[in-house]
Image (tube, rainbow, N blue to C red):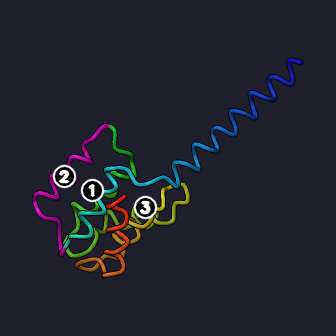
């Protein structure tokens, strides 16, 4: 009987862990991602002072994820294109299967940015920022 209880508990915990991972990867973007997407959708050559302040709040936040901080800092650093120091991080993040779809989308747009996002990219960013 003990083996069956242990097996049951192990299976139950595994199912919960998988369920949490799938939910996290497919859930609507959180507020930090919405802010980054909104700023990037409005961005023309570089972020304005108000947007930089909002992004700096994300970078400094103890509750922001590492991915959110990478994206926020990359937008802060944009001067017509993504900074060289940020580009490799963004390209890796765009390919990271463990990152959310929203994070991968924003990272891909940022990595290839040239002055401003395209109309199609702005539409994708608007969808993310609307959540």
Q: What stretch is highlighted in magenta?
A: 44-62
Question: Where residue 53 appears, x then y in whole percent?
Answer: 15, 52
Residue at which label 3 appears:
102
Q: What label sits on residue 74 in the rendered view?
A: none
Label 3 sits on a secondary structure element that is: helix
Of the image marks 1 and 2, the number of the one nearer the N terminus:
1
Of the image marks 2 and 3, the number of the one nearer the N terminus:
2
- 58 inside magenta stretch: yes
Question: Where residue 121 appears, x then y in whole percent?
Answer: 35, 76
Q: In this view, does 61 lie to the left or right of 14?
A: left
**C-alpha distance separating marks 3 and 1:** 12 Å
Label 2 sits on a secondary structure element that is: helix
Residue at which label 1 appears:
35
Of the image marks 3 and 1, the number of the one nearer the N terminus:
1
Which residue is pictured at 26% across the width and 70% down the height?
41
Label 1 crowding class (10 Å Cα cut-off): few <14, some 14-19, many 20+?
Answer: many
Q: Is residue 69 above or below residue 8?
A: below
> In front: 107, or 10?
10
Q: What label sits on residue 54 in the rendered view?
A: 2
Label 1 sits on a secondary structure element that is: helix
């Amino acid at each position: 009987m003990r083996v069956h209880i242990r097996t049951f508990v192990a299976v139950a915990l595994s199912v919960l862990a998988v369920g949490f991972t799938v939910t996290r990867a497919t859930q609507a973007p959180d507020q930090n991602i919405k802010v980054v997407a909104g700023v990037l959708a409005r961005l023309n050559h570089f972020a304005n002072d108000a947007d930089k302040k909002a992004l700096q709040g994300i970078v400094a936040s103890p509750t922001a994820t590492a991915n959110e901080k990478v994206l926020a800092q990359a937008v802060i650093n944009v001067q017509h294109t993504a900074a060289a120091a940020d580009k490799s991080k963004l390209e890796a993040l765009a390919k990271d299967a463990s990152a959310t779809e929203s994070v991968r989308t924003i990272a891909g747009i940022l990595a290839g940015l040239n002055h401003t996002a395209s109309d199609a990219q702005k539409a994708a960013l608007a969808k993310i920022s609307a959540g």
